[in-house]
Amino acid sequence: MAKPVVAIVGRPNVGKSTIFNRIVGERISIVEDIPGVTRDRIYSSGEWLNHDFNIIDTGGIDIGDEPFLEQIRQQAEIAIDEADVIVFLTNGREGVTAADEEVAKILYRAKKPVVLGVNKIDNPEMRDQIYDFYALGFGEPFPISGSHGLGLGDLLDEAAKHFPKHGQKDYEDDVIKFSLIGRPNVGKSSLVNAILGEDRVIVSNVAGTTRDAIDSQLTYNGEKYVIIDTAGMRKKGKVYETTEKYSVLRALRAIERSDVVLVVIDGEEGIIEQDKRIAGYAHEAGRAVVIVVNKWDAVEKDEKTMKEFEQKIREHFLFLDYAPIVFLSAKTKKRIHTLIPMINTASENHSLRVDTSVLNDVIMDAVAMNPTPTDKGRRLKIYYTTQVAVKPPTFVVFVNEPELMHFSYERFIENRIRDAFGFEGTPIKIFARERK
């Protein structure tokens, strides 16, 4: 189920990043009163009245040396491509400018719902300043103040009216959806072709050939799958085409649609810092993960090479200690047959639900083996545990005082659960709650 996407569009210095941070609820974008200063994350999640959605801050797109109006145009057009609803942001203190009118012209052609926000209306006396903005042709302007958080509720109410009614359910429940993520040129497209047995995706040695997520349907041993190939992710901070920066956004959306994520690493080049950053996206999203080491045919090896490489992966990807590792070659198709069974295992464990009574037996045995910690004379008491969700498996441990649940003891409980039930390939979430 894909979340609706909201894009914040507008000329520089109208407060896009401030509004973005208000909606997201944390300070993600860098905010300074200088046009074009946003250089950080431009994509995050928000929630409003039981509506979950993704939000894009177009101010984060560095267009390079393009002229001022051309930058605005490119930012707006990319947002139009990605968004279900567009928030067109203007500056109430400065009134309607020529640049606002340029943005409006682009949005007229969008055929997407547009909600007009007039920012920097910091007190009720300034509300008369919004009427000029009716001339932009998008209906009622919503007066808001990013710095004080005023008026955002009305703006989001209007945006939510235009969300797709039930999200987008692409495929049936029994279809396993998996995506391939990784930096450019690690062989994701070649791997898709090897799995499909046909040249369905363009394969090239030029980094970044794949621009968008591409779905391919597959039936293997009677099971149905959908492969979501994504554009390669480049290192943040490099100067590259705008579409490359948005390839990260598309990859994140592909992860969101997936049951299982294949983190593809170049076996010939080895592990670099960017591989960890990319894998972190899948882990943070709570998806099942399989680590795939591609180009294994090009590696000079002896009987110890695979074990040593696996050890390096475990050292670098401590947060993915649950993820199985597959070594293969998309080029020669060697060991390709090992991949689908591993995807099946990860998918099954991602949606595995365990019996409450058996779960509590495991937890009580764990507590008997390693008694709960104490702090200043108070001891943690565990009353019972229950699984409350799948994809990923999520457990609530009811205790006397949640703050006594140290992360190391939580980790101990997770390890005992994994020892008892497996859960290979999937993250586990554990929450301590006070028993009322």
Image (spheres, helix red, strand yellow):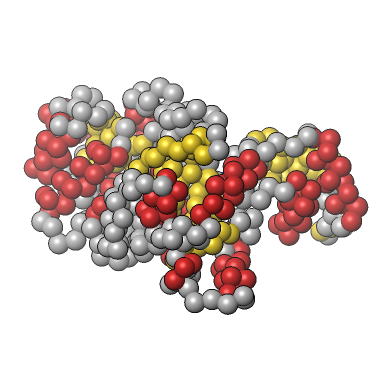
Residue located at (72% from left, 49% from top): 422
Residue located at (11% from left, 35% from top): 105
Residue located at (36% from left, 23% from top): 161
Residue that protrudes farthest toward the left in the picture? 98
Instruction: Determine if residue 434 is in view.
Output: no
Quarter location, residue 68: bottom left
**Which quadrant of the figure contains the C terminus?**
top right
Q: Position of residue 45 (x, y in %)?
A: 44, 42
Q: Nearer the viewer, residue 70 or 377?
A: 70
Q: Is residue 34 above or below residue 81?
A: below
Quarter location, residue 237: bottom left
Q: Nearer the viewer, residue 272 or 207?
A: 207
Residue located at (59% from left, 43% from top): 344
Compared across the picture, whether 250 is left or right of 113 comes to right
Q: Position of residue 397 (x, y in %)?
A: 76, 42
Residue that protrudes farthest toward the right in the picture? 368
Compared across the picture, whether 309 is left or right of 18 comes to right
Q: Is residue 322 above or below residue 311?
A: above
Question: Looking at the image, how many numbered discs can be counted on the residues?
Answer: 0
Q: Position of residue 52 (x, y in %)?
A: 46, 34
Q: Nearer the viewer, residue 185 or 1?
A: 185
Instruction: Determine if residue 129 is in view.
Output: yes
Compared across the picture, whether 66 is left or right of 317 comes to left
Q: Position of residue 34 (x, y in %)?
A: 24, 58
